[in-house]
Amino acid sequence: MHMKFHITTFGCQMNVHDSQWLTRALESRGWEETGEDDAQVYILNTCSVRDKPEQKVYSELGRVAAHCKRDESVFAAVGGCVAQQVGRGFFERFPFVRLVFGSDGIAGAPNALERIAAGSDERVALLDFVTLYEERERPETPAAPDNTRQAFVNIMQGCDNFCAYCIVPYTRGRQKSRTPDAILDECRSLVDNGVREITLLGQNVNSFGLDKGGTGVSFAQLLRAVAAIPGLDRLRFTTSHPKDIAGEVIRAFGELENLCPSLHLPMQAGSDRVLKAMRRKYDMKRYLEIVDGLKAARPDISLTTDLIVGFPGETEEDFKETLRMVELVGFESSFSFKYSDRPGVAAVNMEPKVPAEEAAERLLRLQTLQNNITRKCLKNLVGVETDAFIEGLSRMQEGDALSWKGRDPAGRIVNVSVAESGDLVGRMVPVRIVEAKKHSLVGERTGEPW
Ligand code: SAH
Ligand code: SF4
Ligand code: F3S
């Protein structure tokens, strides 16, 4: 059965990577990815970290329902964190949903989809958690299908931290590290196939190896081993929990040439009292020590973060601490969210809840401050010489020369015009930064693409 499928992905990079893997696994079975209108199988890879992305799943399923009505053989599968949370509940509410799979169950999804497509009338739930990382089949075309020559590599699954607000430990299960051999083998084969940039993925990469699946290799050691692969131009990793970041990892930023000068280090709040209630297990003193260490190791490092406003019990004074810390660290950008109650997490029972209007007002103040800092950071880069790793054409085109969108080593978007034709995706264009926009940079080409 050669089916046409359509995948919609919500949530974090781990979900993006899971969808990429599933796409390739289905393609290796002869299936074909297609647009929304003519698919025979609809796959939703879902996120339940806040209420909003969860609600999106239900509205998306409403749209899929219309497609499934036109032909009885058309069906849907729901995967990811909402699937793990709601499970078989999807079968009751949506008759056209034939498969639900969680983040551990995804390994079995391609075969289950094949069986259903071949006419089996079963409804399949792949929701069991595993205790050790389960290697997934490795599709034949390991490189990114769009030729960007960038790839994600899982180093672990799940999370053991149980931050008071967070549903992830419930939807992704306990932390399970992958073996260093399997990780290195995948990285080498990606680089052999032309990949130039690898992002190592996990909910908390700094605690890599500190679970049952550990082999004694630390995250810092793994990082060194991956960085040493000849031909790997850029190495990144995400996400880091501040409580677990080792001095060796901080120093690596000054030592490993291909380790990109950027780090996403979720701070969540600037008040020690709130951090404690959030069960984050660090205080601002420790956080600022890490920041100092990073800046000493790599003065041009670009720091970004996640912030929550309106956590239960957060006062105006607490919130002002967050503003103060954001300014002090000078995050180049941040993702900030209003606290959202999630089923089963500890914070659901914490009081007093911050009224929605107050949280919205805090969020606005925080984002205004952030925009100002972002603008300053980007302005300071005018004049810098760097390389833009080209991902595709820029959204805005003007003049005769094509404008290409790339990223500098820190991951900032750099748009650059290049006169001659020819595909530049996957190439590095040497540039001098000539202008800072609100969220991106403009570069002028200074040398030959490589
Ligand atoms: N593993 C990552 C975070 C994954 S969730 C880490 O520990 O850093 C991504 C972000 O969503 C979190 O950093 C947090 O800022 C936010 N988030 C998680 N649960 C939330 C909730 N209940 N309400 C609002 N924001 C939340
Ligand atoms: Fe959630 Fe905390 Fe785990 Fe991150 S470390 S996934 S915020 S529980
Ligand atoms: Fe969302 Fe699950 Fe990622 S809840 S943020 S998709 S781990």
Image (cartoon, rainbow, N blue to C red):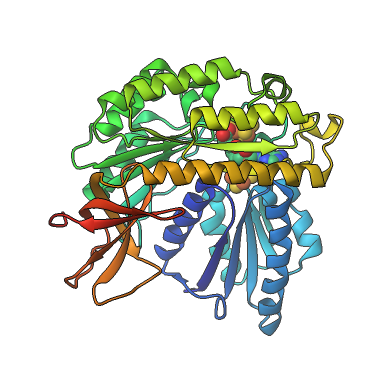
Depth check: 210 or 258 in front? Answer: 258
Of the four image quadrants, the one with ligand 3 is top right
Q: How many marks?
A: 0
Q: Quadrant of residue 401?
A: bottom left
Location of the C terminus (image quadrant): bottom left
Q: At 54% from the left edge and 69% from the top edge, which residue is drawn?
A: 6
User: Vertically, is 251 above or below 18?
Assistant: above
User: Vertically, is 52 above or below 188?
Assistant: below
Depth check: 122 or 360 in front? Answer: 360
Q: At 75% from the left edge and 34% from the top edge, which residue is drawn?
A: 311
Q: At 43% from the left edge and 18% from the top edge, which residue is drawn?
A: 246
Depth check: 52 or 87 in front? Answer: 52
* Left or right: 51 in relation to 428: right
The percent coordinates of residue 405 (x first, y second) are 34, 60
The percent coordinates of residue 164 (x first, y second) are 72, 29
Q: Is residue 212 visible?
A: yes
The percent coordinates of residue 165 (x first, y second) are 72, 34
